[in-house]
Each structure stands twice: as C-alpha cells, then as structure tokens.
Image: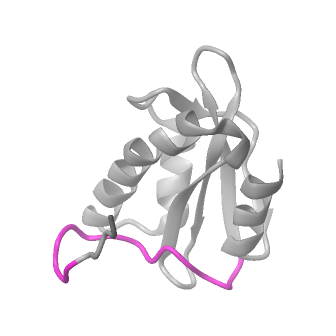
Amino acid sequence: MRFVEVPGGPARYRDRTDKPVQYFTVVDKQSGAVLGYVWGGDEDDAAAYVPRRAAGPAGANESMSWISRLREAKARGIRPSRAVAEFLTGPEPGGRGRPLPGSLTDAPDAAAVKALAESD
C-alpha cells in the first residue's frame, strides 16, 4: 500500500533540511532504550522525529506521538528550535517515549540525524 498525502491538512514543519539542526534522544519510559531522535532547524522551518532502526517496531510506533506534538507546535506558530526546547523541558508526553535529559546536540543537517538513527 502506498501513502499519498493530499494538499491541505494540518500545519507542519518541513521534514528535510540541509541546514544545521538541534536534536535530542527519545528513550523508552520504562526500559530507557533509545527509540529515536527529534530534530529541528529554524533556517528551513523544519522538524521531525526519526525512529532508530535498531529499536524496531517500538521506535517506529513512537512516530505518531512526536508527529502529533510537532504539528501542534507548528499550529501554534512556534519555530522548530522553540518546539524542541519545549519538548525537552515540558511535561512528559503520551506514548512510550520521553526526551533523554541532557541529550540536546547539534548536527550539521537532518541527514546526519537520520544516519545516526540508521547506524546505531
């Protein structure tokens, strides 16, 4: 089955950028296992969740929780960097994952975060 997105719908950040981004690690609330990474970059108004390949279905299933949070942040009109900061300091989200405290890191672009998720 192929998913084809139609125009319109909820506000969202771009899901790609070749500009610098900041990201944090998302871990399982119970086991502490790394599920994926949330990144954001203001220059291209871009942000996304990238599941960690080694996390398998648990990492992929966590996508909807973070996508929903990112869409809500975009709908409020905040920049990606502010959304990332809010996620790190705000209340614990629904879903299985939570931000790992102290994990905020810079990356040269979104591809570097994706490569990290695929390699570890």
What secondary structure do most residues of the magenta stretch adopt?
A: loop
Please say if 53 is above or below 59: below
- Give the residue displayed 70% in from the left and 64% down from the top: 114
The answer to which quarter of the image holds residue 6 is bottom left
The front one of 110 and 80 is: 110
The x and y percentages for residue 15 are: 49, 73
Say which quarter of the image contains residue 88: top right
In front of the other: 13 or 115: 115
In the picture shown, does residue 31 fall above or below 67? above
Q: Residue furthest top?
A: 30
Q: Position of residue 77 (x, y in %)?
A: 31, 68
Q: Is residue 89 left or right of residue 74?
A: right
Question: Residue 66 at what x, y percent from top left?
Answer: 44, 47
Q: Residue furthest left?
A: 8
Q: Nearer the viewer, residue 56 or 26?
A: 56
Magenta stretch holds residue 37: no
State the residue at coordinates (72%, 49%): 104
In this view, which residue lies farthest toward the front?
1
Residue at x-position 69% and y-position 22%: 32
Classify the position of the N terminus by image quarter: bottom left
Q: Residue at x 62, y 39 (%)?
A: 56
Residue at the far right in the pictured view: 120
Provide the residue span drawn in magenta.
6-20
- Display coloring: one colour
Q: Position of residue 101 (x, y in %)?
A: 69, 33
Residue 109, compared with residue 102, is above or below; it is below
